Amino acid sequence: MDGATGSTQDPAKAGKGEPLGEAGEKKASKTVADIWREVQAEQQKFNNIVKVMVGLLIVAAIVAAALAVVSYLRFSDIRDNYDELIARAEAQSRLNAGDGVRAQQRLVNQLLQIREDSEAQRQEAELTRLVDRALSARQAGGPVMSLVELKLQAIEVAKEHLAGITLNNATSHLISSVERSGAIPLTGPERALLEAALADWRTPRTTTAEMQRLIDVSADPAMKGYGHIGLAKIYNDSTDGVDNPGLTDECAAIIDEVRIAAGLGVEAMGPYLWKGECLRDQGRESDAFDAFASALRVGDVATETLDNIRLAAHGAGTTLVARAARAPDAQLGVDEVSDVFNALSPIKEKVPGLIGAAETEDPLAAAYALLEYAANLRVQRGEGEVGKVYTAENIGFVFVLSERWAEGLAHAQAIDQVLPLAWNLTVLHICAIEMAAADGVSNVDRQYFLSEAERARRTLALMDHRRFGEQELKKLLPVRYDDTVDELVRPARERMENAENMAISYSAGAD
């Protein structure tokens, strides 16, 4: 049995001893190459980790940079919005202040009108007593001459009323007393004249029949002329408060009646002013200029109101600008220039600056002189600097037409300091843009001009677009600026239209 089992090693002992055989020899022999490969593998793992970390750092840097750019853009956007809000608030504040100035100026003008009416009443305060004394003296056998003087004065006052110098209590008493007095002989036309003036004073706009009767009963051309002037006055009174009066039948009638009266030898400042306004509303700038120039020609500075003289000078200057603006290449032809100065010749002594303009045959210089004269008349009347800028703003168009951009910008800025006005801001915008586009302007100056143009644009966008009178505004600028006017008006119109649509939607929702 012992021989059968042989000589064997205890497995437990064999496990505790050294490995035997070929496998044990391979496990014991680890070469340098194996170790090097292991080192390279570990190094590759380390390199991969480094690459991942570098990649993560690059990604982190890119993300950080992107976040920085986004943050900067958002900050810039917030800053720009903030600047825009500040600029908008400043513009709105100036407009609100301007509304207050306008309201104050309306009050000033009302007080001036009251003062002028009171002054007229004061000057004629003795008239009522003089009339009563003259009639009493006649009844007591007094001199007839005083009655003749009263008759002549009554006729003159009646004519003035039909020409636009309205009666008052004293002058109406004079006419009424003469008309009713049996002691003062009156012809049929004279009585018709007095009755027409009284009727028009008592019930204005309803005395067409009285005016026509004056025309029909009068053989004297001048007396007929005052009948036509009276009709023009009635038609003019009827256009008060009418939108686009130039399109009405009344305006056409005014033009005809004043023309007929002039043909009969009757001219006065008031009727020419009415005619000029109608012609300007109809777009007939050349004829309107002639009418306003005629108003200045026939108006007596000593007796006419400063307001009427100012209206005539303002109208002549503005229509002259419009004639030049809409002429080819914004320049009047030789024949037109000659016509302009022929019309202005009778008044060149009255208006400072017209003599020099006539010597150089410069119609824009003539327009400047007329507008400056009108602006100064507003100050002389007592309207102050605020009243003055309402006329002086039109001088800016003279600078645009003559391409005197620096003078135009300075002029518009000075007016804007007094009151924000749509036409003046348009001139300011145009002059600033033109100066920014000029050759040789520095970057600093260009940025300043562009900022002024933007300020004007921003303010205009907040205005009531109905203040623009854009069709009239276009007439005072060369054709090339029509698109500029449209661009400046559009934001204001869209803002108001959106507000109106929102109000309609809210009203519909409430229903």
Image: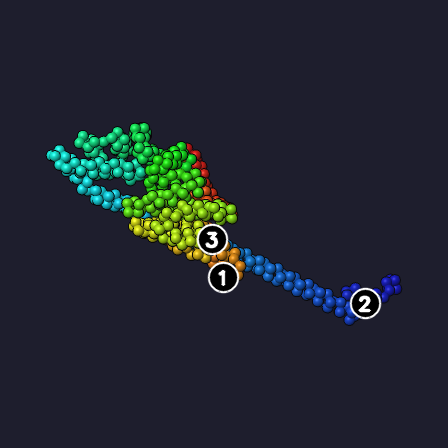
Whether pointer 2 and pointer 1 mark residues with C-beta atoms closer than 8 Å, the reply is no
CA gap, disc 3 and disc 1: 26 Å
Q: Which residue is mark 1?
A: 444
Seen from the viewer's position, the closer of residues 158 and 413 is 158
Residue 490 percent coordinates (x, y):
48, 44
Q: Is residue 298 visible?
A: yes
CA gap, disc 3 and disc 2: 109 Å
Q: Which mark is residue 281?
A: none
Q: Residue at x 83, y 66 (%)?
A: 22
Q: Secondary structure at mark 3?
A: loop
Q: Mark 1 packing: few (<14 Cα in 10 Å), some, or many (20+)?
A: few
| Mark 3 or 1: the one toward you | 3
Q: Which residue is mark 2?
A: 26
Which image quarter holds the N terminus?
Answer: bottom right
How many marks can you see?
3
Image quadrant in which you'd find residue 152: top left
Q: Which mark is residue 402?
A: 3
Q: Secondary structure at mark 2?
A: helix
